[in-house]
Image (spheres, grey):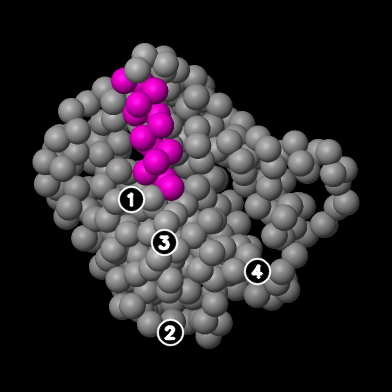
Amino acid sequence: MDASVIFRQMCMIFLLIAVGYVACRRGIADGRAGKVISALVVNICNPALMLTSVLENGGGIGNEKLLQAAVAGVGIYVCLLLIGKALPVFLGKNPLERDQYALMVLFGNIGFIGIPVISAVLGTEVLIYVIICNIIFNILIYTYGRRLVCRHSGESAAKTGGIVNPGTVTGVACVVIFLLKPSLPEVLVKSVDYVGSATTFLSMSVIGISLANMPLGKIFKETRLYAYILARQILIPIAMGWALKGLIHDTEMVAAFVLLIAMPAANMPLMMCEESGVDGALLSKGIVLSTLFSLVTIPLVAYGVA
């Protein structure tokens, strides 16, 4: 594990958050802009990033290893879903907070941060494991995750997309593309790549806009978030990493999954809250703190599982 690579990547993430923060403070962007940008990320940019990942890195492993990775990925998310039902009981003060802790437990930032970090540390040939987890992530975030958000907005999950939505449709398309490996026009592939490339900047700028509307001191005074980080970013990844080592003999696959489990909180739940008009203050704090602490926690997890 190259700690310097992770440190540089996280520094870049914080600079992008700072852009949104400064833009809001200077009056260039406001809460309404954050809501519009969130809708673009959720419905267009993030699906495009997912398609780009499979188009560029979809042919590196055989079907047997793909099946093993898919089973492992499903097992990981089942475990995180169950933990996400239990842990928030001790952390959240009310139903909204408990649901947002559940979202942070289940959804790590495997796309916006995981893809560049893992490609830098382990190489692009293992990105297929990120793609598999991304497909599971998107199916869950656009169904279960959206349901958790919508019950605090007065909307129904069906009204905002239900199971047929950009994330799940893109997940199916990714599987088809991986299996069939069609030859697509370069202009189409490039166009999708350009749209997907905007995801990281736009999503991080929304976090900055959200932070600009709250006192920064409150981020570090949310003491329960430190308990969440200890459990979610250190104890759980190490425990699941050791379990994976006992079940999977492919060291690169295990390393990729351990890194993915150790990622900080994802920003997609916050995008959905912004889009639906739900107060995402706790998510904003959790994303910033968990990303900040990931500078230390990711290498610590890698050392603990090695």
Q: Which residue is mark 3?
A: 6
Indicate which disc, 2 or 1, sits on the residue closer to the N terminus: 2
Q: Identify the residue at horizontal 56%, vertical 63% (top origin).
A: 119
Q: Earlier in the sequence, mark 3 or mark 1?
A: 3
Q: Is residue 198 visible?
A: yes
Disc 4 to disc 1, C-alpha distance = 25 Å
What type is the residue that disc 2 sits on?
A: Gly
Q: Position of residue 300 (x, y in %)?
A: 30, 71
> What percent of the width, then of the height, locates residue 127?
60, 63
Quadrant where the image shows the C terminus:
bottom left
For the stretch drawn in magenta, the main secondary structure is helix
Say which mark, if any, is on residue 291.
1
Find the distance from the CA under tag 2 to the CA under tag 1.
29 Å
Quarter location, residue 232: bottom left
Residue placed under numbered mark 2 in the picture? 246
Viewer can see residue 277: no
Quadrant for the N terminus, please: bottom left
Mark pair 4, 3: CA separation: 18 Å
Q: Residue at x 14, y 35 (%)?
A: 217
